[in-house]
Amino acid sequence: MDDASPIEEIQTLFMSEYIRERRLGIEKAAELLAQGLYREQLREMLVKIAHGDPINNLAEYAQQVLDEDMRRHESLPPRYESKGSEHIVGATCPRCHHPNYYDKRVICPGEERYRILRADGVQIDRIAVKCQKCGEEMRIEVDCEGYK
Ligand SMILES: [Zn+2]
């Protein structure tokens, strides 16, 4: 029985002198990436192919897989600090640790809001929200300026 890990299998394919085997390696890597497995190792291996394979087609194919993987990860829920997500605030649930995301345009006009003055002089709103997974109630601090 062959009990080599998928990573080792792909590594072996990548080191093959046959183009079709290296191509197969890229296909397998793409499948695993699509499942979110071994992401760091696979990306590292694919980058080597994308920059070092003497066969242009293969190098381009590896780059495509890398780009696809990038796009897939960019489409994850926006994080508080990321660009273009100025309407979104993030809060980790204290009970189940679920990462919640709330839209200021939805939560700011609500009733459950207390305006407070923070120590650094910034006015901020404290809003009661519920965890989207377990329903735990928590208060998050949000700058609702312009959302009411
Ligand atoms: Zn929760």
Image: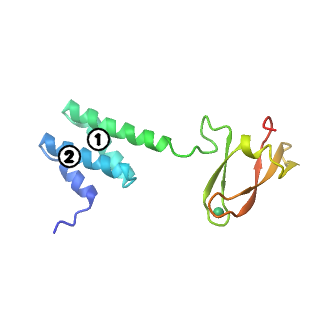
Query: Which residue appears at 14% of the width and 47% of the height?
Result: 16
- The numbered disc on residue 24 is 2
Dot in front, 1 or 2: 2
Residue that mark 1 sits on: 48
Residue 65: name its quadrant: top left
Task: Report x, y in % for residue 74.
Answer: 49, 41
What's the distance in space between the residues labelled 1 and 2, CA to CA?
Answer: 16 Å
Instruction: Give whichever of discs 1 and 2 has the lower sequence position.
Output: 2
- Does the numbered disc 2 mark a residue whose Cβ is under 8 Å from ligand 1? no
Secondary structure category for the residue under label 1: helix
The picture quadrant for ligand 1 comes to bottom right
Nearer-the-camera pick, 5 or 127:
127
Q: How is the image coloured?
A: rainbow
Q: Residue type at mark 1: give it.
A: Lys
Which quadrant holds the N terminus? bottom left
Query: Which residue appears at 33% of the width and 52% of the height?
Result: 32
Which residue reaches farthest left? 18
* Crowd tier of the residue under label 1, counting other residues whose Cα lies within 10 Å: few below 14, some 14–19, many 20 or above: some
In the rendered image, the vertical position of residue 84 relative to residue 73, given as above or below: above
